Image (cartoon, helix red, strand yellow):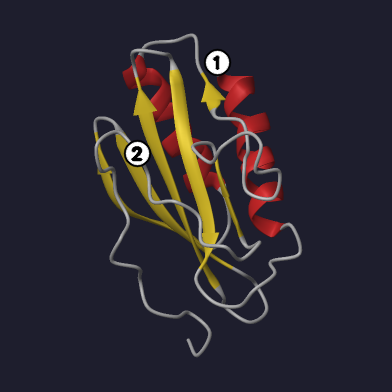
């Protein structure tokens, strides 16, 4: 696809952190400072075991349209979400922190400046479905 862009090479967990959001408003992250209202979003919280939480999250992601899981491990999940019309790709990562029963997340558009709130809305949709499974 012409609008898919190139997969970033800075994804993954580094010292317990996902990559920081760029300055553009087309990214949300639970690890951004809470004072950064453009980028900060609450992490997911779970009450089940870490294994069940990640399995539930994977099942929520797989239920979404135009989604492909690229990488997964016992504490990390990375998926690509593609927009319906133009095929823009967003990179969405989840890092499970079992010490605090939270799943940190980052959702970022590969191309462009504004995402018209798509990344934030996607995360909130995932949160709602995930919470129903917990």
Q: Please say if 80 is above or below 34.
A: below
Q: Residue at x 35, y 71 (%)?
A: 7
Q: Position of residue 28 (x, y in %)?
A: 59, 49
Disc nearest the viewer among 2 and 1? 2
| Left or right relative to 41: residue 45 | left
Question: Which residue is the site of mark 2?
Answer: 17
Q: Is residue 123 left or right of residue 81?
A: right
Crowd class of label 1 (few under 14; some 14 to 19; many from 20; radius 10 Å): some
For marks 2 and 1, the one nearer the N-term is 2
- The residue shown at (53%, 59%) is 108
Residue located at (65% from left, 72% from top): 84
For the residue pair 91 and 36, the one nearer the viewer reads as: 36
Label 2 environment density (alpha carbons within 10 Å; few <14, some 14–19, many ≥20): some
Determine which quarter of the picture holds residue 134: top right
Q: Is 113 situated above or below 64? A: below
Q: Position of residue 70 (x, y in %)?
A: 32, 56
Query: Mark 1 highlights which residue?
Result: 134
Mark 2 element type: loop
Q: CA–CA distance between discs 2 and 1? A: 24 Å
């Amino acid at each position: 696809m012409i609008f898919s862009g190139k997969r970033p090479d800075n994804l993954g967990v580094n010292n317990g952190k996902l990559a920081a959001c760029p300055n553009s408003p087309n990214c949300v992250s639970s690890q951004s400072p809470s004072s950064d209202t453009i980028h900060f979003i609450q992490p997911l919280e779970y009450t089940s075991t870490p294994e069940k939480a990640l399995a539930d999250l994977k099942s929520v992601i797989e239920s979404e349209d135009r989604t492909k899981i690229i990488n997964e491990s016992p504490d990390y999940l990375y998926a690509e979400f593609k927009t319906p019309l133009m095929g823009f790709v967003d990179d969405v990562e989840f890092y499970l922190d079992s010490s605090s029963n939270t799943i940190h997340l980052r959702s970022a558009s590969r191309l462009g400046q504004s995402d018209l709130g798509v990344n934030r809305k996607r995360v909130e949709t995932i949160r709602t479905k995930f919470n129903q499974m917990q």
